[in-house]
Image (spheres, rainbow, N blue to C red):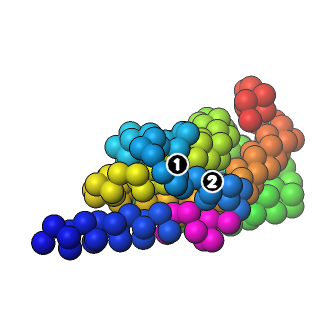
Amino acid sequence: MNVVYKNSTAALVIGIIAISTGPAFAGPFDGLSNMIPGHGDSAPSGARSAGDLEGDLTELNRHFAKAMKEMLIAQSYTIAALGDQVEADKLSSEANSLEGTNDLNTVSRSITVSEDASKEIDAKMAASGEMDAKSKQTLSMAVPHYEAGMIPAIRLPNDYRLWITSARATVAGMGNSPMNAIGGGARLARDLPNVVDVTAHLPDLISTWSDTSHNFVKFSHRNHVDTGDLSSKI
């Protein structure tokens, strides 16, 4: 019975490390795939406990969800001011669906929605003329949400990359202590591929948000809508 248990545990560790450091991770973090230790009891540099990393990921995801929600609200107000209330309601509903979430899968499903909204907003602002008073008032309501979304969002790509570096080092280190593969370690290895995939899309998302935010400021100024010091913060 003990032999079977040891063999199955070793197989689990090998499987986890193979999944977390194999070819699927080719990209900006590819160098980390060579961090599997050969001998000894020490973990690779940068390794932390699986529990700490899970807590950090939950907090990161919460910040991402908050930034996404704020940007969707900003986009909702902007596109409503531009005359598309149907799309505005969809974006508002999408924003509400993120209330209180810290699940990365839930947040990542909103990426395409927000990117498409930015494209429509940019096109509409470029083609729009002078707005009426009601539309200007609606446009002004987007200002604080652009700020609340963009400021924390700028840090997200780097913060997720730092998390990935530590997580991959920790998963690699599990080969030195097979029992660490049970429970938290296994969950960490399971989460890594999804985090890497979402992180790869973040720079494009933040760039899109940044472009739309700056276009929003320019458009607002053309329509004599006060944006405060938004331009200096984004």
Question: Disc 2 marks which residue?
Answer: 32
Q: Residue at x 12, y 72 (%)?
A: 1
Q: Quadrant of the C terminus?
A: top right
Of 23 and 219, nearer the camera is 23
Mark 2, secondary structure of its residue: helix
Q: What residue sits 75% from the left and 63% below the top?
A: 119
Q: To which residue does mark 1 refer?
A: 169
Q: What secondary structure characterizes most of the magenta part?
A: helix
Which amino acid type is shown beneath numbered disc 2? Leu
Instruction: Indicate whether 104 appears above or below 140.
Output: below
Q: Of the residues shown, which amino acid type is indicated by label 1? A: Ala
Asked whether 32 or 91 is in front, the reply is 32
Magenta stretch encompasses residue 20: yes
Q: Which residues are magenta?
A: 19-26
Q: Is residue 133 left or right of residue 107?
A: right
Q: Is residue 213 left or right of residue 17?
A: right
Kindly indicate the quadrant of the structure image that contains residue 13.
bottom left
Residue 97 numbered tag: none
Residue 104 falls left or right of residue 158: left
Queried whether the magenta region covers residue 80, the answer comes back as no
User: Residue at point 59% right, 42% down?
Assistant: 162
**99 shown above or below 24:** above
Using a 10 Å C-alpha cutoff, classify the residue at mark 2 as few (fewer than 14 neighbours), some (14 to 19) or many (20 or more): some
Q: Are marks 1 and 2 in contact (CB under 8 Å)?
A: yes
Coordinates of residue 30 in the picture (x, y in percent): 68, 59
Instruction: Quote the CA–CA distance across marks 1 and 2.
Output: 7 Å
Dot 1 crowding, Cα within 10 Å, few <14, some 14–19, many 20+ = many
Q: In the image shown, does 178 or 165 lie closer to the viewer?
A: 178
